[in-house]
Image (tube, coloured by chain):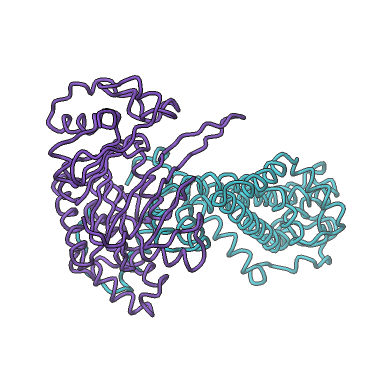
Chain colours: A purple, B cyan
Amino acid sequence: MNRTQALIELQNVSKRYRRRTAGSARDTYAMRSVNLAIRPGEVVALVGESGSGKSTTGAIIAGLETPTSGSVVFVGDTLPSRLSGDRLKDYRRRVQIIFQDPFSSLNPVHTIGYHLMRPLLIHKVAASRAVALQAAEGLLEAVGLQPAANYLRKMPHQLSGGQRQRVGIARVLATNPELLVADEPTSMLDVSLRLDIMNLLLDLRDKRQLGMLYITHDLSGAHYMADRIMVMYRGMIVEEGLSGVLLSSPSHPYTQILMNALTRDITGLEDIPSPVDTQSAEQGCSFASRCPHRMAVCVSELPDWATVAEGHRVNCHLYSCSS
Amino acid sequence: MSAASPSSTPAQGAFRKFRERNSRILPNIKARIGVGLLLAFVLLAVLAPVISPYSPTYTGFSLGASPSPAHLLGTTRSGQDILSQLIWGTRPSLDVSLTTGSITMLVAVAIGILAGLLEGIIDEILMLATNIVLVLPSIVLVIVISSYISAASDVTISFIIALTSWPWGARVIRAQTLHLKSKDFVKAAIASGENHFRVAFFEILPNMFSLVAANFFFTCLYAVVTVASLQFLGLGNINAISWGSILYWANNSNALMIGAWWWFLPPGLAIGLLGAAFALINFGIDELTNPRLRREGP
C-alpha cells in the first residue's frame, strides 16, 4: 500500500441525529466510529444500502455536516469541530461534492454560466467576470459539453439529466479541488450514460490526481471505479479492502448477501429490516438482526476488526473469534 | 424537449426570456384583467392633474348638486366636485396599499428567511414573535393606534397596517425556506463557498418569487380595504382627499339617507375594483404556480 499522506482521514467519527418529538428525544446514529482515509489519486468506494450512513459520511467530508464525535484530519491538520472564516473557505475550495440528483443540484433560476462562474469568483480563481466566463467555457469543454459557449446561457431545465450531471461535475472542478465526494453521481441517470460519467470521473482523477470518495449502492460500479471498497451497514464500516480482493472473496455476511443479490441468488435476503428501525444495535454488531450466522456474542458485543488477507479487513465476530 | 435553439446574441436572448416570461403570465385571463385594472388606476393617479375637471378642494360649486354635464358625479354638501375628488383620491389609495404591501413583504421575507435558515433559538424567538402578532386582533389594533396618533399620515397608517399583517407571509416564507434549504442546489451553493447572505437572497429567494408576489398583492388588497375603513370611521387624515374620506364625508352628510348615490357609490366601487385587481393578480399567480388550478386552454 502506498504510504503517502492521506488527503483526508476520518477518525472514529460518529454522527447522531436527534429527533425531538413532543418532549422525548430519539437518537439515530447515522455513523458509528467510522474510520476512513483517502490518498491523493485514490478512489475509495463507499457501498451500502439506503440509510446506511454513506451519504452522511460524504456530507461530513464535504463539510456540509459536522461530526458528533471523532475527528476529521485534512492533509495532516485536525480540523476544529466547526470550521469558519478563511479556513472554511480554503476547505470549500479544496474539497468538493457532486450530488446524486442532477435535477435538484442546479438552481432552476440561474444559468449554467452562473453556476460555473460563482465558484470561480468566490475563490478568486478568476480575477474578473470576463476571465471567469472564459474559464467556465473551458470547464464545460473539460466535461465534454461542446460547443461550450452554447451551454453558458442555458437554464438548467433546458438540459437533459446527463448534461446536467456534467455541469455538476464542471462546477466542482472550477476550484481545482484535491478531494471529490461523488454521492451516487450515476444512480439517477440512464444506464447508457452511467459509464460515460464514470469514465469522465476516472479520467479527471488521472489528470488531476484527485482523491475521490465514490458513494454508491452498486457493487459493480464500485468495482469499476474504486481502488478500495468500504462496505457500510447501518452506520458502521463492516468490511474494507482493495476492490479486487474484497470482491473475489467477500467475507462479511452482509457483503456476501450483496454479492449474491448481484448474481441473482437472493436466498437469505428475504427479511430486510428497516435500516434505522431501533437503537438495539447500540451494543452489538449492527448487522446482527439480519445476519444468517448470528451468534450470542453478536448481539452483546461490538466485533473487532480482523485481517482476512493483505489489504482486506472485516469487522465481524465470525473472524475475530477464530483468530 | 431540449431542442438545441439557434445561437443568439445576449440581447436576443434577453428578449426571448422576456417574451417567454410574459407569455407565461399574460395568457392567464384573471391575471390579465387584474393587471389591466391596476394599470388603469395607476394611470388615473398619475394623470390626475390632467384629467381631473376641477380642483378637488375647491368649494365654490353649488352645494349637494346631483350629476349634471358640468359635474358628472355631482357635488358634495360643501360644494366640491365629486369626480375630481374620486380621481385625486386614487393617489393616496394606491400609495398606501403599495407602501403597505412593500413594507409587509420586506418584513415577511426578512423574518421568514432568517427563521428558516437559522434553526434553533433564533428561529424559535422569531416564530414566537410571529405567532404573537398573528393572534393580535389587527383591525382593532390599527384603530386604536391610529386614533391615538391624531391625524396620522398615510405613511404612518401604512406602517401600522404592516405592523400587524407581516406574520402570514413570514410563516409561509419560512416554510418554503425550510423546504428549499434541503434541496441539493442550496447545499451545492454552500459547498462552493457562498455565504449566508448569497444563499438566502440569490439561491433561495428567487425560487420563491411567486410566493413573495402573492403575499405582496394580498397585503395590498388588505391595505386598500383597511385604509378605507379607517378613513370611513374618521381616523387618519380625513381632510386629505381619498376614497375613504369621500365616504366619510358622504356618511357625515347623510348621503345614504337622501339617496345621493353618486356620492357614496363611486368611491365604494373604486375601492372594490382596486381590491379586485389585486385579488385577480393573486389568483393569476396562484394558477400559474399551482398546475392543478390551471385550466386547459390555448
Q: Position of residue A187 (x, y in %)?
A: 24, 44
Q: Is residue B181 left or right of residue A151?
A: right
Q: Is residue A136 left or right of residue B115?
A: left
Where B220 sits versus A268, above or below?
below
Between A57 and B274, the one lying in front of the other is A57
Q: Position of residue A251 (x, y in %)?
A: 20, 34
Q: Position of residue B93 (x, y in %)?
A: 68, 58
Q: Is residue A190 visible?
A: no
Q: Total label count?
A: 0
Between B177 and B146, the one lying in front of the other is B177
Within the image, what quadrant is residue A275 found in?
top left
Q: Position of residue B245 (x, y in %)?
A: 78, 55
Q: Is residue A184 left or right of residue B213?
A: left
Q: Is residue A193 left or right of residue B57?
A: left
Which residue corresponds to the image point at 23% horizontal and 23% vertical from the top-left?
A269
Between B255 and A22, the one lying in front of the other is A22
Which residue corresponds to the image point at 17% horizontal and 61% vertical from the top-left?
A203
Within the image, what quadrant is residue B44 found in?
bottom right
Within the image, what quadrant is residue A118 found in?
bottom left
Which residue corresponds to the image point at 82% horizontal and 41% vertical from the top-left?
B257
Which residue corresponds to the image point at 33% horizontal and 75% vertical from the top-left?
A132
